[in-house]
Image (cartoon, grey):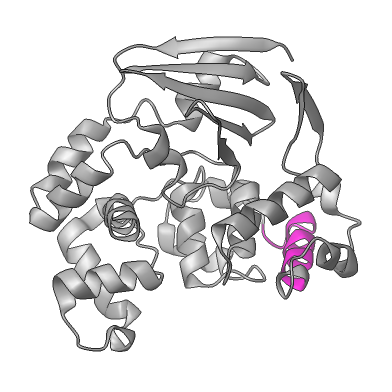
Amino acid sequence: MKEQIYEIKNIDSFELRDIFECGQCFRWDKEDDGSYTGVFKGNVLNVKKEKDNVIFKGMCNGNIKEIVEEYFDLNRDYAKIKRELAKIDENMRISIEYGKGIRILNQDLWETIISFIISANNNIPRIKGIIEKLSKKYGDKIEWNGKQYYTFPSPEQLKDVTVEEYRKLGLGFRDVRLYETTKMVLNKKIDLDEIQNTSDTSVVREKLLELAGVGPKVADCILLFSTLKRFDVFPIDVWVRRVMNDLYIHNEDENKVSKKQIEKIAEEKFGNLAGLAQQYLFYWRRES
């Protein structure tokens, strides 16, 4: 690998904070100059925005232009999507204005599965710390700019890792889940290539739910934030339940609001753009 640079001028719908701080990814860190550096799919990349131009620089496992376009979903018209969603109601218009630079990343399916299993009942700094330790111990090293970075380990790189070794990384109750899911993927009980090529979202969700540590919310996050790219799902956590209740349901006790209620409203209001609507609403309510 060698260092490569790629610049896009006058880019629309691309704000670093909106993309990297909206809860979809865990391996991007903010630098002192406001840029972000991350490790993904065997690449180390720094992303910097200057006015309306974005500069990508780093060590890439392939052509940087192709890698950036695919990972950052640059061939999708987010301006058109935002116009469609903003017509729905004032709540969507305000949330889109707040998170106008969000793009849903095309993250590696395997890494997304493990990352969101780790995310269960966890906070972002701790999730990031565990993933970094896992990568440093079992991934491949990449040296760039005088620093060492580590790729996310493949299922094969984790095949001999024991539950006890996972526990030492601070995984807690998730250690067994990580161990079992890795074995299921290695044994092809769950075939990731087959999942990737299955068009029916409900069929893919049922397959993901077979994995240890994957419940409905984690399954929907995997469906939305990985290369599966299913915008018709609507992941529901405490923030999403709260914002949907506050804006649309108005139950005095938000804990009594059911997942089915929320999903019904999401499908009726947002249709096949529900996942993106969820991101705008979630990010707006959590951050503001």
> Left or right: where does residue 260 sit relative to residue 58?
left
Residue farthest front in this picture:
32
> Left or right: where does residue 148 sit relative to residue 74?
right
Quadrant of the drawing holding the C terminus = bottom left
Would you identify the image quadrant in which residue 202 lies?
bottom left
Q: Can residue 264 be seen?
A: no
- Give the extent of the magenta segment: 176-190
What percent of the width, then of the height, locates residue 283? Answer: 33, 53
At x 47%, y 58%, the residue is 221
Quadrant of the drawing holding the N terminus = top right
Q: Is residue 88 above or below residue 267?
A: above
At x 82%, y 68%, the residue is 167
Q: Is residue 167 magenta?
A: no
What percent of the width, then of the height, locates residue 59? Answer: 67, 19
Q: Which one is in front, 262 or 141?
A: 141
Q: Report how many numbered discs are placed on residues in the image.
A: 0
Would you identify the image quadrant in which residue 54 lies?
top left
Q: Can residue 46 be seen?
A: yes
> Left or right: where does residue 86 sit relative to residue 145?
left
Q: Is residue 27 above or below residue 177?
A: above
What percent of the width, then of the height, locates residue 44? Answer: 65, 27
At x 63%, y 71%, the residue is 213
> Left or right: where does residue 132 sit relative to residue 51?
right
Give the prevailing secondary structure in the magenta stretch.
helix
Q: Which one is in front, 221 or 205?
A: 221
At x 19%, y 42%, the residue is 97
